Amino acid sequence: MEASVLTRPEYERVGKALEAGGILDEALRWSHRRTGFELFYRAVASPELVWLDRAGSRRREIRVFQEVTRLPPEAVPADLHEPLHKDLSFVGEARLDLAPTIVRLLRLTPLWREHRYDPLPMGAIQIGRGRLVPPPNATRRVPEGRVAGAFDAEAVFDARDLDAFARFMLANKGPLESLLGHEVRSDILKKPTQQLGLVLRKLGLQLAKAGTRKVSGRKFHRYRLDPVALAAAEEIVAQRERKGGWAFLVDRYGPHMDPSDGDDWAETEAEIERVADLLRGTTWDIPEEDEEE
């Protein structure tokens, strides 16, 4: 917690040095890590927040949650059951394919409300392996709320409601295991709720029990999204969208933090990811964020 927060020029200089394999003292590396941490959360690196971050796992979850809930509708095919491209079993990339794939899974469950819009003049472009690239005007309209869908915090369901979800996962087992990083269970048709829980975990979400129901003498456990986990993820994303990373540091520590008077956070995040692996293996109070699995 005693590491200083770097100014933007310092942060960029240290990032380039780390990327080039430069030898830096521990205090400077520590400061670089703390700065990246506060840039992401738009919050001071308190002991409580560092603990909740879980060695970078929380940041990975929030990134996926933000990408999933801010995905343009043109990024997923209209056909709910269109199979994933088989090549994604071998060449799937999390940064390109994970969020659209998760949305495709979620919309086969009661937890997701799909949003429908009139098509834009220029539709999505397919660039191979089933990947859809939304047109620029679709991406620009995401802040207005034009997204593929949203979580339904009120939805209650049981295993019978997940049949389409389970069958889609079985039919696309190879690509899904590659992208999600976990196995498609052999008993998914009998226990689809457990598989859905694994998918939600990628976004920092989880299920909560919502009672039971008896049908023809058989008892079914009912579930819903855990409202606390959902609200926490939504609040972090909202905080990230309300203010840019460097704007937060300027407000917190003073105008000297960003002499450029700019706030290209997308570029800053990319830099953080490029140097993250260079910091691996060092012990810090604020742990590094690992690469996506």
Image: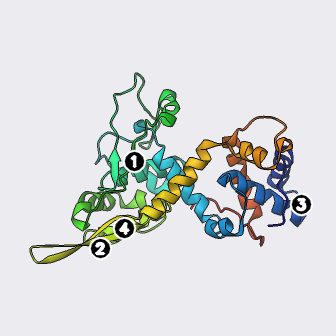
- The residue most toward the top is 121
Q: Which quadrant of the figure contains the N terminus?
A: bottom right
- Is residue 115 visible in the rendered image? The answer is yes
- Residue 158 placement (x, y as % from top left): 25, 66
- Can you identify the residue that label 3 sits on? 24
Marks 4 and 1: CB-CB under 8 Å? no
- Residue 266 placement (x, y as % from top left): 66, 42
Whichever of labels 4 and 1 marks the residue nearer the N terminus, that label is: 1
Q: Which quadrant of the figure contains the C terminus?
A: bottom right
- Can you identify the residue that label 1 sits on? 150
Whichever of labels 3 and 1 marks the residue nearer the N terminus, that label is: 3
- Can you identify the residue that label 2 sits on? 187
Marks 4 and 2: CB-CB under 8 Å? no
Number of other residues with Cα within 10 Å of mark 3, as a class: few under 14, some 14 to 19, many 20 or more: few
Which element carries disc 1, helix, strand or loop? strand
Q: What amino acid is at disc 1?
A: Ala
Which element carries disc 4, helix, strand or loop? helix
Of residues 98 and 284, which is closer to you in this image?
284
Residue at the image position 39 percent from the left and 67 percent from the top: 207
Marks 4 and 3: CB-CB under 8 Å? no
